[in-house]
């Protein structure tokens, strides 16, 4: 599986593991907040949501997952599903892992949404980890959260990403890139990879393998064993 | 990728292609109805939902996707998201492709839900295709819709499936099985495979490759080229 071969190269280049897993809380779940806005893509939201949610069946205290919309109201996904939010920007609890799935306007009008960008910047600075899926990388980049870090985004939008953020180091062809506290994924069906990797990184291969069994994902990836 | 190798074996055994693609409507989208109940699993719903939805960007008229809950009200997914339904059993339009994602109680109490089982049986008999993800196969099987067909389900539940439905031919180790009008998938992250396959089957490899590009899925699968 090419994606993981590339991941290994990324790991080999020493860009992963620069974060501090020792900061994980042990007396409460790790709080994983997903930013959802109208036009959010189902898969980019659901794939990491499920992987992180299922940690609670394989470790304690695991992760608490929730979705945050700007005003706390429901959002309509790109594919036409209406999903209720758990919190608004104002009511959301402190977030340890901020996840930004792509949305229809992640590359344009969402970036002009001052309230959203301020929230992402503020929450993202405090978070232990940042995860973007697909064009969610545009949101992290526009918030300045990818400065000095290597990253990636949806393959078809890499050129636009480089053009908009010429100061960033961008990698093509990797399922995801982990640098510092940022994990940026190509998105789509590849959105599982980055989430599985983070679970392994935080909780170990046995927990990740357990989550993988429930999600019909071989872990470690066959090529890595 | 093992999943697709096994698929090829299944195809080679002549179990696919027994359906009638010539019946596809050309003057309207193919109506793809997803059964959703409380406890439905996100990925098993979203993966095929996205693949089928994205057909409209690559072919005409493509597929119209919608979710149907028993009473038309919102459902809470296993992972804790609240999703509004487009239709109730009563208000749903005729369904060409019935999709049954797994839910928390697909193996037990859902099968005792007479209204649900009657609806699945009635709609399933008329549908051109049936797609189950993970334990959704229990629902199709209990409705009698897999009689005489080979099928599969979530790997960890294959033994229970065989025990409950000893008259069925069950295959282990395949990402999905296509026999007659039924496509049954292991579920989880593998839920994309069966949907991509059906898109290819109905609309051809070029359309499937287009959908795949948007979902960061190589199509045809690398091992098949």
Image (tube, coloured by chain):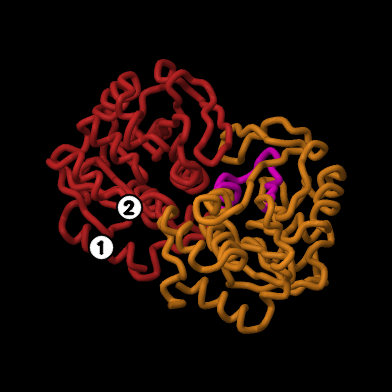
Chain colours: A orange, B red
Pinpoint the chain carrying mark 2: B
Pinpoint the chain carrying mark 1: B
Asked if the magenta segment contains residue A41, the reply would be yes
Residue B207 visible to the viewer: no
For label 1, the SS is: helix
Q: Which residue is drawn at 29% across and 46% down?
A: B184
Task: Locate residue B57, reporting x and y percent.
Answer: 52, 46
Q: Which residue is drawn at 58% across and 49% down?
A: A49
Q: How crowded is mark 1: few (under 14 residues within 10 Å), some or many (20 or more)?
A: some
Q: Nearer the viewer, mark 2 or mark 1?
A: 2
Quadrant occupied by the C terminus of chain A: bottom left
Please indicate whether residue B11 sits to the left or right of residue A193 in the image: left
Residue B147 visible to the viewer: yes
Range of the magenta residues?
A30-48
Task: Locate residue A54, reporting x and y percent.
Answer: 52, 50
For label 2, the SS is: helix
Q: Residues within 10 Å of mark 2 (few under 14, many from 20)?
A: some
Residue bearing the label numbered 1: B8
Please indicate whether residue A110 sits to the left or right of residue B8 in the image: right
Task: Locate residue A109, reporting x and y percent.
Answer: 78, 45
Residue bearing the label numbered 2: B156
Say if B41 sits above or below A124 in the image: above
- Seen from the viewer's position, the closer of residues B161 and A48 is B161
Query: Mark 2 and 1 residues: CB-CB less than 8 Å, in contact?
Result: no
Find the residue positioned furthest to the top.
B90
Asked if the magenta segment contains residue B47, the reply would be no
Q: Residue at x 85, y 52 (%)?
A: A122
Marks 2/1: CA–CA distance: 23 Å
> Which numbered disc, 2 or 1, marks the residue that appears first in the sequence?
1
The number of numbered badges drawn on the structure is 2
């Amino acid at each position: 599986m090419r994606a993981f071969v590339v991941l290994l190269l990324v790991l080999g280049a020493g860009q992963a593991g620069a974060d501090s897993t020792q900061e994980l809380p042990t007396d409460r779940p790790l709080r994983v907040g997903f930013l959802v806005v109208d036009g959010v893509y189902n898969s980019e939201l659901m794939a990491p949501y499920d992987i992180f949610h299922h940690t609670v069946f394989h470790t304690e205290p695991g992760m608490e997952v929730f979705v945050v919309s700007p005003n706390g109201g429901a959002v309509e996904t790109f594919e036409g599903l209406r999903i209720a939010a758990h919190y608004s920007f104002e009511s959301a609890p402190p977030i340890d892992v901020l996840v930004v799935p792509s949305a229809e306007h992640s590359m344009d009008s969402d970036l002009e949404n001052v309230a959203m960008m301020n929230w992402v910047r503020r929450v993202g600075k405090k978070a232990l980890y940042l995860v973007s899926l697909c064009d969610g990388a545009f949101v992290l980049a526009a918030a300045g959260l990818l400065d000095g870090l290597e990253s990636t985004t949806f393959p078809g939008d890499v050129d636009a990403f480089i053009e908009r953020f010429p100061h960033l180091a961008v990698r093509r062809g990797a399922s995801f890139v982990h640098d510092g506290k940022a994990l940026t994924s190509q998105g789509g069906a590849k959105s599982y990879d980055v989430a599985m990797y983070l679970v392994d990184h935080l909780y170990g291969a046995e927990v990740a393998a357990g989550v993988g069994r429930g999600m019909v994902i071989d872990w470690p990836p066959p090529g890595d064993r």
